[in-house]
Amino acid sequence: MEPASPVVLALMTAPDAAVGEVIARTLVGEQLAACVNLVPGVRSVYRWEGGVCVDDEVQLLIKTTAARVEALRARALAIHPYTLPELIVINVVEGNPAYLSWVQSSVAGAIDRAPDAE
């Protein structure tokens, strides 16, 4: 039996709660993420096309495994409305072992299935 893929935390912003929820439900529903927290009230200041912009956004905290990152990236970027969505992946170094195991088992079943299998 192969060892479980390490848990990672992916960060992504969305323009509002409705878009964030669509992304979250899609990723969890397709077993690309075990859980997505939507954190409202994020104010982003960033440089874009030569100017400084300020926008209210929702921060998505996406829990998944390293093995699912590539598929998660492809799916999230396909449904995200931004031209250049944020997607930053951070390795989880330590955590509640039972929670980390739950994350792994929540997304592991999708790895061995064909894309259109149910």
Image (cartoon, rainbow, N blue to C red):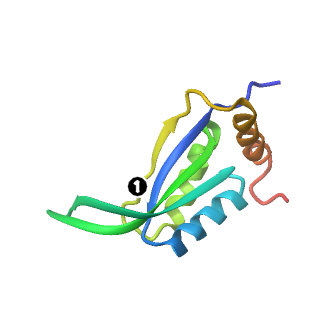
What residue did someone put label 1 on?
86
Quadrant hosting residue 99: top right
Q: Quadrant where the C terminus lies?
A: bottom right
Badge 1 marks a residue whose secondary structure is: loop
Which residue is at a point 56% across and 45% down the rendered structure image?
Answer: 70
Q: Nearer the viewer, residue 93 or 50?
A: 93
Name the image quarter holding the N terminus. top right
Residue 87 percent coordinates (x, y): 45, 51
What is the three-letter code of the residue carrying label 1? Glu
Tell me if residue 19 comes above or below residue 106 in the rendering. Answer: below
Q: Residue at x 54, y 55 (%)?
A: 74
Residue located 71% across and 42% down the image: 103
State whether residue 19 is above or below residue 113. Answer: below
| Residue at the bottom extreme, as displayed | 18
Q: Residue at x 53, y 67 (%)?
A: 20
Where is residue 24 shown, x and y percent of the image?
61, 62
Crowd class of label 1 (few under 14; some 14 to 19; many from 20; radius 10 Å): some
Q: Is residue 54 left or right of residue 78?
A: left
**Residue lying at the far left of the rendered structure:** 50
Q: Is residue 73 left or right of residue 95?
A: left
> Residue 56 location in percent, x, y?
36, 69
